[in-house]
Amino acid sequence: MSRNRGAGLRVLQKRCEGLRWKGMFIDADDDPTVQLSNSRIYWCVYSQNPVGPDGSIVDEDSCTSSRKCYKRA
């Protein structure tokens, strides 16, 4: 069975185009001997830090269409 080592489904389906996380930039083969991790550190491509241009925290749950800076990917 294939394991999804990338982002969660929320991030893949409805993420803001400015949302970034380390896993986006790692191209590695799946290794079943390595435990899966869901720890992600997010940042905004527009503000270049973990706080978006609107002053709110950046993550997969917070970066929604309710924010003025949101742009659907």
Image (cartoon, rainbow, N blue to C red):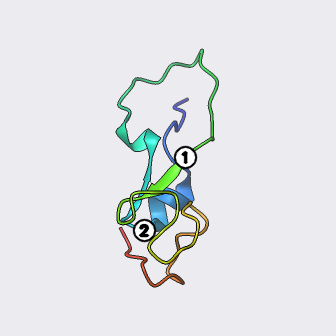
Circle 2: residue type = Cys
Badge 2 or badge 1: first in the primary sequence: 2
Give coordinates of residue 17: x percent, y percent: 36, 65
Give coordinates of residue 7: x percent, y percent: 51, 47
Task: Return the residue at label 2.
Answer: 16
* Secondary structure of the residue carrying numbered label 1: loop
In-front residue for pair 31/51: 51
The quadrant of the image that shows the C terminus is: bottom left
Q: Residue at x 63, y 41 (%)?
A: 38
Q: Nearer the viewer, mark 2 or mark 1?
A: 1
Circle 1: residue type = Ile
Q: Which image quadrant is residue 29 in?
A: top left
Pointer 2 local density, CA inside 10 Å: few below 14, some 14–19, many at least 20: many
Asked if residue 22 is positioned above or below residue 27 in the image, the reply reads below
Marks 2 and 1 sit apart, C-alpha to C-alpha, by: 15 Å
Q: Residue furthest top?
A: 33
Asked if residue 42 is positioned above or below residue 60 in the image, the reply reads above
Give coordinates of residue 65: x percent, y percent: 49, 81
User: Circles 2 and 1: CB distance less than 8 Å?
Assistant: no
The quadrant of the image that shows the N terminus is: top right
* Secondary structure of the residue carrying numbered label 2: loop
Pointer 1 local density, CA inside 10 Å: few below 14, some 14–19, many at least 20: few
Q: How many marks?
A: 2
Q: Residue at x 53, y 74 (%)?
A: 55
In-front residue for pair 16/55: 55
Task: Return the residue at label 1.
Answer: 41
Give coordinates of residue 64: x percent, y percent: 53, 75
Q: Residue at x 62, y 30 (%)?
A: 36
Q: Residue at x 39, y 43 (%)?
A: 24
